Image (cartoon, rainbow, N blue to C red):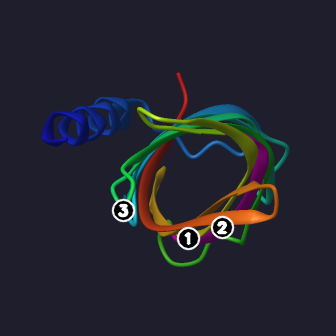
Amino acid sequence: MKKLFMMAVALIMTTAMSAQDIEKGFSFASEVGIGSELELGVRAQYNFNKYFALDLPVVKYAYDYGDYSVNEITLQTGVRFFSPTFGPDLKVFTALDMGYGNMFDSYDNVHCFAMDYTIGLYVWKGLYVGYGYGAMIKDGERYNDHEVRVGYNFTF
């Protein structure tokens, strides 16, 4: 688990050099979430303007180290809204993504609906922190996760 966490930190740090504050066009992001599970995610984002963007493919892997030690993979799409910039580089954002989820362990493989909600703050150029809530829903049963997320939005 330490190796996985260190790889995620290295990915975020190597992409930091190409960060820009993009207002229109494509950008990409990688993030790490730590809380009721360990989550690693990447996404492509199309920015229509400085207030609205689409999260095109959002791919996340999570290891839920709760009672059952379940692995989760999600493929989602959604919307992202930004506030006007205040302070030097600060702006608030919120994102809602929905799509396909797969929970699996050594005994079972469950396909389900996945939803993810994030609210956070860009603290410097592309670096952001926030709170994330994820839910996987199958046959009316919901599996919830809560994380603190740290990510970096960049362009090539």
Assign a secondary structure to mark 3: loop
The image's mark for residue 154 is none
Q: Helix, strand or loop at disc 1?
A: strand
- Mark 2 and mark 1 in contact (Cβ < 8 Å)? yes
Residue at x-position 75% and y-position 52%: 97
Q: Nearer the viewer, residue 61 or 26?
A: 61
Front-most of residues 44 and 64: 64
| N-terminal-most mark, 2 or 3 | 3
Q: Nearer the viewer, residue 141 or 93?
A: 141
The residue beneath circle 3 is 66
**Hey, which quadrant is residue 16 in on the image?**
top left
**In magenta segment, residue 93:** yes
Marks 1 and 3 sit apart, C-alpha to C-alpha, by 25 Å
Q: Do the residues labelled 2 and 3 touch (CB within 8 Å)?
A: no
Residue 51: give x, y in percent of width and height. 79, 60
From this view, report whether residue 83 is shown above or below residue 71: below
Mark 2: secondary structure? strand
Q: Residue furthest top?
A: 156
Type of residue at label 2?
A: Phe
> Dot 3 surroundings within 10 Å: few (below 14), some, or many (20 or more)?
few
Q: Percent x, y for residue 34?
A: 35, 60
What is the spatial separation of the Cα atoms under label 1 and label 2, in whole angstroms?
5 Å
Disc on the earlier residue, 1 or 3: 3
- Please state the extent of the stretch shown in magenta in the rendering: 90-101
Q: Residue at coordinates 48% horizontally, 50% vertically from top-left?
A: 126
Residue wearing tag 2 = 93
Which quadrant of the view contains residue 99?
A: top right
What's the mark number on residue 120? Answer: 1
- Quarter of the image with the N terminus is top left
